[in-house]
Image (cartoon, helix red, strand yellow):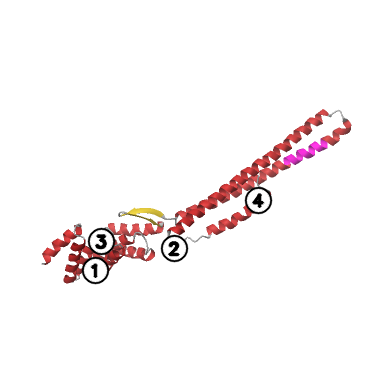
Amino acid sequence: MCSPKSHWVARALLPALLGSVLAFPASGALFEDDEARRAILELRTEMRQRIETLRRDETSRREADQKALDDVKRQAEEIAYLSRFVAQLKNQLESISGEAVKIRGQGEQLGLNMADVQRRHAEQIKRLEDQVKRLEDRLKTVEPVKVSFEGSEFFVEPAEKGVFEAALASFRKSDFETAQNTFNEFLLRFPRSGYSNSALFWLGNAQFVLKNYTAAAQSFRKMISLSPGYARVPEAWLAIANCQLELKEMAQARKTLEDLVANFSQSEAADIARERLSRMR
């Protein structure tokens, strides 16, 4: 059974512990690596373990209090029995009756005290559970989630996933101006995201549709430099050649198409490049 002192220490530490947890910054920058994410998960696990310890301590204390109350009730019953047994002994009746009243009063007071303690502890646990729920709800808004996109799996923050999906949705609705702006915002906010190669690819396509050919070519080149093994690299080379053709850079376009055929000969983009080269001769 936990001592009163241990209960007092636990109650004193709870507000400080909760304050330190709730003060944990919610900035997206905290989750830029797996170590920070693991720290969040370990923190939440530690909180739950401490709550479980408090609950076990409360259960032990309740059992001890109940035992004490049962002992007092048994004493009251024994005194009542003795009172009836010596009822004929007038000289002792008053003394015994007074003692019985006193003990019964103590039992009633202990019962009242125990009910009050139980109520206060129940309220404390309820407040703690509410605080933990608020913390968990807060963590859900920043806790990394695993996604699978275009053959790759990686962890992203909820906000990161939301901005990328919003940009891609704008592109698919042919709202290329919004898509261009949102992809640019995404790349500024999340430069190390697992979505970065895809964001650059679709940004380049939006810029091409908007006739921003120089910017589009730069986006495709940056994508190739960032992820040379990305499945859309051949498409990006073909898109660069298209930008060069639109800018009337015929020699550069021919060289880009020839490099595409040489380096990605089995790709669909290489087949298109061969056809265009044959028309340029």
Callout 2 amino acid: Ala
Question: Residue 63: x, y in percent?
Answer: 65, 40
Callout 1 amino acid: Tyr
Structural distance between the alpha carbons of marks 4 and 2: 38 Å
Is residue 248 in view from this perspective? Answer: no
Residue located beneath label 4 in the image: 6
Residue located beneath label 2 in the image: 29
Instruction: Choose the circle earlier in sequence order: 4 or 2.
Output: 4
Asked if residue 237 lies in the magenta stretch, the reply is no
Residue located beneath label 3 in the image: 233
Foreground mark, 2 or 3?
3
Q: Secondary structure at mark 2?
A: helix
Q: What kind of secondary structure does the magenta stretch mostly adopt?
A: helix
Q: Residues within 10 Å of mark 4 (few under 14, many from 20)?
A: few
Residue 227 disc label: none
Callout 4 amino acid: Ser
Structural distance between the alpha carbons of marks 3 and 1: 18 Å
